[in-house]
Amino acid sequence: MIPNNLIHITIFRDKFNKDNTLGQMYINGSFFCYTLEDAFRGVKIKHEACIPEGTYRVELTRSNRFKRILPILIGVEGYEGVRIHRGNDEGDTSGCPLVGFNRSEDRVFNQAESKLMDFLTDKKNILITITNL
């Protein structure tokens, strides 16, 4: 049974480039923004590969690296500290999904992090599903 207060984020990865992976983020079935991650490589390469497809629990915690509260994905096998945050291209990520309201062939821009945090703040039951199309 799915709790009424569940926030379900879905990332549909839809563009696979040599250096990055682009996707679309939905929250509870409604389009929210675009995403950019490291390239899909099929194997883990630290700081160079997107995380595996799957469903993960999300918590809002303070990032020591970014010095602010950000969503962190819990239980990503072989990865630690996977957070959803702002950025533009693969140079801004180490396996983390970046969020932006617009995208080009190899970037996201018009940062969506603050609006995402506005939506998620005070939510306790958050899941994310990441799927390759």
Image: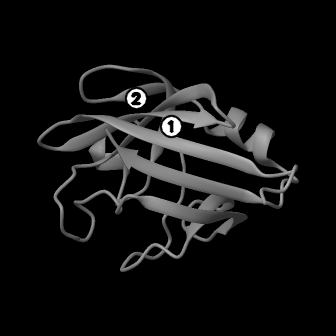
Quarter holding the C terminus is top left
Of helix, strand and loop, which one carries label 1?
Answer: strand
Measured in 3D between alpha carbons, the distance from the residue under mark 1 to the one under mark 2, in whole angstroms, is: 7 Å
Q: What residue type is labelled 2?
A: Val
- Considering only vertical position in the picture, is 96 above or below 44? above
Of residue 105 and residue 62, the one placed in the foreground of this image is 105
- Residue situated in front as seen by the camera: 22 or 110: 22
Mark 2 neighbour class, 10 Å CA radius: few under 14, some 14 to 19, many 20 or more:
many
Q: What element carries label 2?
A: strand
Cβ atoms at labels 1 and 2 below 8 Å apart = yes
What residue is disc 1 on? 99
Q: Can residue 11 be seen in this view?
A: yes
Going by the numbered disc 1, the residue's amino acid type is: Val
Write the residue at 40% across / 47% down: 131
Q: By what rule are the colours in the image chosen? A: one colour
Viewer-proximal residue, 51 or 90? 51
Residue lying at the far front in this picture: please name it: 1
Taking the image as shown, residue 31 lies to the left or right of residue 124, namely: left
Q: Which residue is the site of mark 2?
A: 108
Where is residue 29 drawn, in percent x and y? Answer: 64, 32
| Residue located farthest toward the bottom when viewing the structure as drawn | 78
Instruction: Identify whether 111 is placed above or below 13.
Output: above
Residue 95 screen position, x and y as percent: 36, 59
Horizontal placement of 79 versus 62: left or right? Answer: left
Of labels 1 and 2, earlier in sequence is 1
User: At 37% across and 53% down in the image, what residue appears?
Assistant: 93
Q: Residue at x 28, y 45 (%)?
A: 90
